[in-house]
């Protein structure tokens, strides 16, 4: 279980997040939604210890992520931000192999190799594994990063807008793969999604942020209501039933 | 997912990648072996060929110079590779941080305050140690102070180093103009690369320090690989980024201080070795790149000195020529690569 | 009060100028100026040119900084952080070697021409590379400068001109007398030119595409801007040496205090740079009296401090 208590993040006088407290239970897919500047990324990266909170505490399965040894945390949770830039020419397989670093410190064991193959397989990257990252499309690169996180094989997986850069087809596939990671591999997936309908279709829980506070949270059924979403996004939202799924319509 | 080898356009890059792989197919171990063989050959040529007069005397003299070259090649090559990894930038060299300027200012101050004879009179281990400590202290002050803020940015750190470097240089310029020409001559021998006049008594200490620092860096070779992926990915993989950065920058400053105290400031030599190392190694892995850079540095210095001495009869010019070439290649590389 | 602030600043600068005129190794006061012809001659030959040179050089560097910052759209550039000054130094050195007898005016021409090349090279390199951060720009410039100065140092070391090089790099105003500073008046023209063309430079700084779509001759504006910078840098380098950081800190401090309108800031930039320069010169003359530290060195120290503070403040606000 992820627990965060009185998390606050300020830059000088501006508080961009909190204080917020809450829990995300183990298992399943949880989506963070909310308008721009609501503090979603800040919350996610604080949980993933990429951002230092101004105050507050985060524990994941009892492990204080900002105090515990980083290496130990890396075996419990993995966190991925939007597209990273770096200078090295790395192949897909090499990138995925980095996911084993917290376990092997760089010296790959046969078990590591098996995990790497599994991760490549899981994201259908087998054919691309010897390509360099700079030869890939944005979507393929995104998948390679997710494969790295899968190879890291942590109970908790945090993803900041994994659908960024992906077209319709690849967005659907990516969400399907994350759903499978939760269902088949038993992972706890927490992600930021812009499209509320994607969140509703593939998640178990939705946490909505607004102006640095948690505006509402709960199951998909509890959250996909016109009055809740209208309030959260500050935009009139109607809910229609499409093929048995509640779908938000907000284009006018 | 079936979106890869089905269509013609996506096949093209695959085959291109394959031919590329075939073209540079030599395995990395073989590349290292070739570099080692070349290094051995140029070291042997430098040490043994064209000796006139007493073999023992000449050999011993060359051995001292060779020792200096080993330390300088090691320190500059390793420091630059590590520095480029932590700055995510294959074009920077540690001297951009103002190391050279600190060294020049220290030497200039010594001469201005105590006169021209002080340099020769104070040469020795205590001075080497003091110089190194001062240069390391400068780096640590800078980092400690800058990283104490919540958002320590490496670019800001670089820029501050650069600015302080400029300020030190302007101060040195002023102090230098106050010197008598004789004093200035003494000083200027210290301000330019001087492999052949290095002090033999520095070598054991400098070599020992390089060994220790080298061992610590070697032990971190896989961590260095993860740093290439950027701060956030490295943190995700369990690296305590800020601490790692501080430790590595400290080690870099020790190496550069050693090399500078031995052979004077160099700006582009490290760049040259690191760039060539990446080209020849064909991989980003520090396991390969670090030894490769050292070997290339050694080849450049020993082979270069051999050529300068016996082909161009200009043995004192080696470092100047290397800096020249390194600088020119730097510019060419900057324009070709299209980013800093 | 706001309307009075500019005249007040002018008065303040005038006061500084007066102090600068009457401080020096040779005792001159207002009365002896009228009674003693020797004093009057001394005053006109040495004090007045020195103070004028200070004022003009300060304005030159500050205005060069403003132009470069507009053209490159980056707060951190000025002739010393773009390698332009190093090019000027190379030009002077080459001329000293090839034509030792050349008149100062020719030297200034050479320095200016090299500074122009340097500014072009900088812009060319900048145009060719992707910039991920504001602070990368001055780092590129300083690396380019290091490259040029490696060449300069090499040439100087093989021709025994190293110490000479150090001497006029650190420059100073103590040797400025009547007959050497006059070319600095060029700067006056440049200030006026900038005042007239300020908007165009701002638009050119937004990039070629924006400039063309607004109907401005991009290349010509760039050329004019660079020529102005190169002239100012070349002339200043020859007359008084490198003046580090002035063109950088003054425009930045002024726009911190007053916002970003170049045209209304310009008088403030000129006044503050003059005040800073004269203050540094006075400090340099007074602390180690009867010797003196060149104003450029004092400015190097003060400027570095202010610059570093500026970078750090900027870090607090936005992610650089």
Image (cartoon, coloured by chain):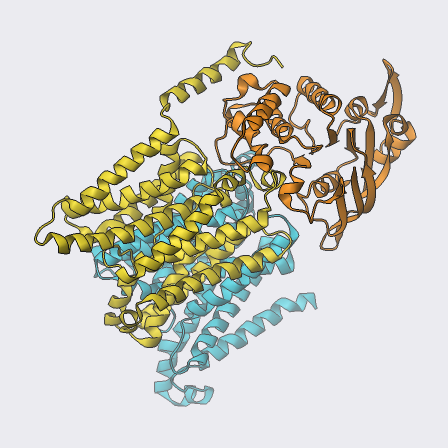
Chain colours: A orange, B yellow, C cyan
Q: Residue at x 34, y 66 (%)?
A: B125
- Locate residue B196, reporting x and y percent: 23, 55
**Residue C194 shows in the view:** no
Residue C119 as seen in the image, left or right of residue B305: right
**Residue A213 shows in the view:** yes
Above/below status of C316 relative to A205: below
Q: Residue at x 14, y 56 (%)?
A: B57
Q: How many marks?
A: 0
Above/below status of A111 relative to B140: above
- Closer to us: B176 or B241: B241
Residue C115 as seen in the image, left or right of residue A179: left
Residue B135 as seen in the image, left or right of residue B145: left
- Locate residue B123, reporting x and y percent: 30, 68
Considering every residue shown, the one lying at the far left of the view is: B53
- Locate residue C156, reporting x and y percent: 26, 58
- Closer to us: C2 or C66: C66
The N terminus of chain B - image quarter: top right
Above/below status of A157 relative to B78: above
- Closer to us: B270 or B242: B242
- Locate residue C139, reporting x and y percent: 47, 49
When asked about the image quadrant of residue C184, the answer is bottom left
Considering every residue shown, the one lying at the far right of the view is: A227
């Amino acid at each position: 279980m992820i627990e965060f208590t009185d998390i606050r993040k300020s830059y000088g006088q501006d508080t961009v997040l909190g204080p917020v407290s809450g829990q995300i239970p183990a298992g399943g897919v949880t989506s963070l939604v909310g308008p721009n500047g609501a503090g979603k990324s800040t919350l996610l990266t604080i949980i993933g210890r990429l951002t230092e909170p101004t105050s507050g505490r985060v524990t994941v399965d009892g492990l204080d992520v900002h105090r515990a040894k980083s290496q130990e945390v890396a075996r419990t949770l993995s966190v991925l931000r939007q597209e990273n830039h770096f200078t090295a020419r790395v192949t897909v397989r090499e990138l995925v192999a980095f996911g084993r670093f917290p376990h092997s410190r760089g010296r790959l064991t046969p078990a590591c190799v098996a995990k790497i193959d599994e991760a490549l397989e899981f994201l259908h990257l087998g054919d691309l594994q010897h390509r360099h990252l700079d030869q890939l499309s944005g979507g393929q690169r995104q998948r390679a990063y997710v494969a790295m996180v899968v190879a890291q094989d942590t109970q908790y997986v945090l993803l900041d807008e994994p659908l960024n850069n992906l077209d319709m087809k690849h967005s659907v596939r990516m969400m399907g793969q994350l759903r499978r990671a939760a269902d088949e591999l038993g992972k706890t997936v927490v992600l930021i999604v812009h499209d509320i309908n994607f969140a509703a279709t593939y998640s178990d829980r939705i946490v909505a942020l607004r102006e640095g506070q948690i505006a509402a949270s709960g199951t998909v059924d509890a959250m996909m209501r016109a009055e809740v979403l209208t309030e959260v996004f500050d935009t009139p939202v109607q809910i229609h039933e499409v093929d048995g799924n509640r779908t938000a319509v907000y284009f006018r | 997912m079936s979106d890869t080898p089905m269509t013609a356009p996506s096949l093209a890059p695959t085959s291109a990648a394959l031919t590329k792989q075939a073209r540079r197919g030599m395995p990395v171990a073989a590349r290292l072996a070739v570099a080692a063989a070349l290094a051995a050959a140029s070291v042997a040529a430098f040490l043994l060929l064209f000796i006139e007069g007493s073999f023992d005397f000449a050999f011993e003299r060359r051995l001292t110079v060779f020792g200096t070259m080993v330390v300088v090649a090691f320190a500059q090559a390793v420091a630059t590779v590590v520095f480029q990894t932590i700055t995510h930038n294959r074009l920077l060299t540690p001297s951009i941080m103002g190391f050279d300027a600190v060294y020049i200012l220290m030497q200039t101050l010594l001469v201005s305050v105590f006169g021209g004879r002080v340099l020769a009179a104070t040469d020795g281990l205590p001075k080497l140690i003091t110089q190194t400590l001062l240069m390391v202290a400068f780096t640590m002050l800078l980092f400690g102070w800058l990283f104490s803020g919540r958002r320590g940015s490496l670019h800001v750190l670089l820029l501050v180093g650069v600015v302080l470097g400029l300020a030190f240089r302007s101060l040195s310029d002023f102090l230098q103009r106050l010197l008598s020409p004789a004093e200035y001559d003494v000083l200027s021998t210290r301000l330019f690369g001087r492999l052949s006049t290095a002090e033999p008594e520095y070598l054991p200490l400098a070599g020992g320090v390089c060994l220790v620092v080298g061992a610590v860096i070697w032990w971190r070779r896989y961590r260095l690989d993860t740093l290439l992926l950027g701060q956030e990915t490295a943190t995700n993989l369990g690296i305590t980024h800020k601490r790692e950065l501080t430790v590595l920058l400290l080690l870099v400053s020790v190496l550069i201080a050693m090399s500078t105290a031995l052979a004077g400031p160099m700006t582009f030599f490290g760049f040259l070795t690191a760039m060539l190392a990446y080209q020849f190694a064909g991989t980003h892995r520090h396991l390969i790149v670090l030894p490769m850079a050292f070997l290339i540095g050694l080849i450049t210095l020993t082979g270069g000195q051999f050529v300068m001495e016996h082909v161009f009869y200009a043995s004192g010019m080696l470092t100047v020529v290397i800096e020249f070439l390194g600088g020119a290649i730097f510019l060419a590389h900057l324009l070709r690569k299209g980013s800093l | 009060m706001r309307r009075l602030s500019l005249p007040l600043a002018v008065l303040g600068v005038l006061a500084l100028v007066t102090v600068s005129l009457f401080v020096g190794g040779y005792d001159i006061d207002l009365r002896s100026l009228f009674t003693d012809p020797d004093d009057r001659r001394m005053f006109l030959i040495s004090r007045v040119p020195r103070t004028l040179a200070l004022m003009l050089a300060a304005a030159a560097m500050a205005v060069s900084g403003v132009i470069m910052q507009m053209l490159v759209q980056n707060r951190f550039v000025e002739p010393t952080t773009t390698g332009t000054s190093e090019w000027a130094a190379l030009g002077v050195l080459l001329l000293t070697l090839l034509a030792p007898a050349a008149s100062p005016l020719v030297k200034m021409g050479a320095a200016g021409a090299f500074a122009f090349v340097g500014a072009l090279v900088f812009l060319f390199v900048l145009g060719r590379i992707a910039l991920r951060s504001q602070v990368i720009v001055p780092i590129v410039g300083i690396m380019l400068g290091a490259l040029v100065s490696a060449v300069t140092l090499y040439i100087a070391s093989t021709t025994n001109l190293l110490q000479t090089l150090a001497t006029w790099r650190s420059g100073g105003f103590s040797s400025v007398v009547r007959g050497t500073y006059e070319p600095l008046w060029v700067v006056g023209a440049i200030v006026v030119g900038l005042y007239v063309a300020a908007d165009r430079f701002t638009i050119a700084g937004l990039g070629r595409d924006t400039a063309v779509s607004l109907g401005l001759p991009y290349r010509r504006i760039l050329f004019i801007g660079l020529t102005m910078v190169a002239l100012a840098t070349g002339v200043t380098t020859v007359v008084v040496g490198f003046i580090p950081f002035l063109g950088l800190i003054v425009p930045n401090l002024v726009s911190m205090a007053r916002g970003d309108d170049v045209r209304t800031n310009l008088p403030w930039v000129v006044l503050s740079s003059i005040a800073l320069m004269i203050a540094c010169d006075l400090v340099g003359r007074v602390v180690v009296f009867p010797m003196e530290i060149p104003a450029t060195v004092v400015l190097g120290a003060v400027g570095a401090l202010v610059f570093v503070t500026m970078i750090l403040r900027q870090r607090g606000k936005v992610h650089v």
